[in-house]
Image (cartoon, rainbow, N blue to C red):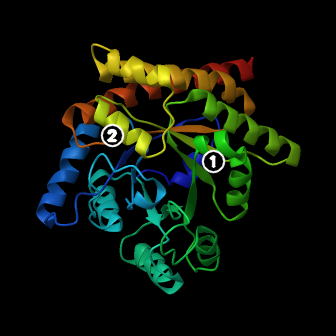
Amino acid sequence: MKSSLKDRFSDPQRGVYFIGTTPPRENTSAEQVSEIADKLLGRLSSIDFDGVIVYDIQDESSRIDKPRPFPFMQTHDPRDYSRLIREKSHHPVITYKSVSQKDRPAFEQWLEEAWSQYGIRDIVMVGSPSSEGDVRLSLNDAYRALAEHQHDYNLGGVTIAERHAKKGDEHQRLLKKSTQGCSFFVSQAVYNAQATIDMLSRYARECKVQGITPQRVILTFTPCGSSKTLDFMEWLGISVPEATRYRILDAHSPLAESIRICRGNLEQIIEACLPLGIPLGLNIESLTNRKDEIDAAIRLFKLLKATLDLKLAEQSIQTIS
């Protein structure tokens, strides 16, 4: 097993690099789940990654009136899939947990089982997608329950630049979540570089005012190869500027164009935010199970990792000189 994520996160001069994935469908047999994990890790054999992020998918239909472009499917237990990926890959795994569906005793049981039965140490907790519906446990209450729990999880939080663009307060959410135990953050997929720059700049500025060190922010990127994937991205709340949408849709190769867009967005974010002292990382995911988009995610990972590594090396040289 590689060194803990806490150790790697603690060095602000290095990037951290993840692949995001979703567990197979709930009705998938154990043998097929193992085969799917092997197939994923076979694809990852050509890249140098720090770990895998396993999502806990929830039905977000209460958040938006539009129909979901892809049908919602219950998935295999993320804890079990995380354990499988960790044991097969010998890499750390960050496991997402959606907290709103069960009450506090059930959540505390989940924490105990995740630690003792599944060997999970790194988690990201996600609240309800909206205030509508039956919210059994709020995200704030889940943070309190975790703080009072016996096990010392390495806790991360979600950050959404689009929310900052609308409300202007995402930096305050980051600061509050830090006091609630979050030591790193994972962004929603980035297709609007300026929204991310605005959020990170405001966060860094507020940290400087308060005399605290910014936590690491892991930026998520995803390739997009079709109008349906683009519709799904926008359904999820990912901000795609109009010009960017048409660049992808009108391109001879939408996938290749989306990769160029992602690289350009990362370069803009690095130029604006790396000097602010926020440790960065990358998480590359495919939002669909289409083979071409999954393969494109691996290409995107290689390209963006090389981009961030180069900029961090240049910054290190400038600091020394």
Give the mark nearest the N terminus, 2 or 1.
1
Which residue is drawn at the image coordinates 56% and 66% (left, top)? 131
- Residue 168 occupies quadrant: top right
Name the residue rendered at 38%, 23% in the picture. 258
Residue 309 percent coordinates (x, y): 52, 26
Outermost residue to the bottom: 105
Q: Quadrant of residue 320?
A: top right
Residue 263 in view in this figure: no
Q: Position of residue 273 (x, y in %)?
A: 68, 29
Please, is residue 212 above or below residue 196 in the view? below
- Amino acid bearing label 2: Ser
Q: Which residue is mark 2?
A: 286
Mark 1 lies on residue: 10
Residue 38 appears in the picture as rendered: yes
Q: Secondary structure at mark 1?
A: loop
Where 20 falls versus 253 (above or below)?
Answer: below
**Direction from residue 161 to residue 91 in the image, left or right:** left
- Image side of residue 292 versus residue 155, left or right: left
Q: Nearer the viewer, residue 282 or 225?
A: 225
Give SS at disc 2.
Answer: loop
Residue 38 point in image, percent of width and height: 19, 50
Label 2: how many Cα within 10 Å (few below 14, some 14–19, many 20+): many
Residue 160, compared with residue 128, is above or below; it is above
